[in-house]
Amino acid sequence: MRKAVAERYRNIDFSRAKRGPVIQPEPGKTKISIRLDNTVLEYFRALVDKAGGGNYQTLINDALLEHVHRRSTLDVVRQVVREELAPYASTLQRTRSARR
C-alpha cells in the first residue's frame, strides 16, 4: 500500500524547489524548545479551553512579555526614586550619625 501512495508523487519535478518552510515565520519570533512544568501547561491550556479556543503558546508568550515589561517599569521607577532621593541621602546619614 505504501508503494502505491509513493508512486503518485514520483513524477513531480522538484528541480526548482527551495528548502525551508512554505510559510515564513513572523519577524521577531524564534522557534525554540523549552521544558515547562505540566502544571503550567495545564493552566494555560485550561484558559484556552475556557475561552473557547485559541493558542496556549500565545498566552504563555503574553504572560512572559507582561512580566518583562512590569519588571522593566519597576526598575525604572526605582532608579527615578533613587535619583530624586540622592540629594537627601547625605542629610539622612548625618541625622543617623547624630543619633548614635
Image: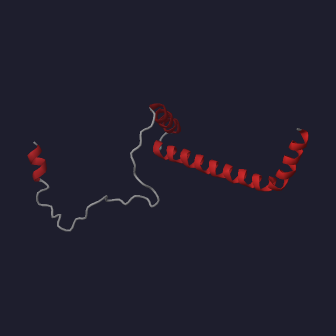
Q: Quadrant of the N terminus?
A: top left
Residue 71 spot, x, y in % from top left:
63, 48
Looking at this view, is 84 or 43 the one in front? 84
Q: Position of residue 14 (x, y in %)?
A: 18, 63
On the question of residue 27 being in view, the answer is yes
Q: How many marks?
A: 0
Residue 24 lies in what quarter of the image? bottom left
Measuring from the top left, give residue 6's x and y in whole percent: 12, 50
Question: With respect to residue 100, does 91 lie above or below?
Answer: below
Q: Residue at x 51, y 44 (%)?
A: 59
* Display colour scheme: secondary structure
Which residue is painted at 59% across and 46% down in the image? 67
58 left or right of 4? right
Identify the residue at the far bottom of this view. Answer: 16
Q: Is 94 in front, or is 23?
A: 94
Q: Which residue is at the front of the view, 10 or 28?
A: 28
Horizontal and vertical percent for residue 36? 45, 37
* Quarter occupied by the C terminus: top right
- Please indicate, yes or no, whether residue 55 appears anywhere in the rendered image: no
Give the residue at x 44% y 32%: 38
**Residue 36 vertical placement versus 27 (above, below):** above
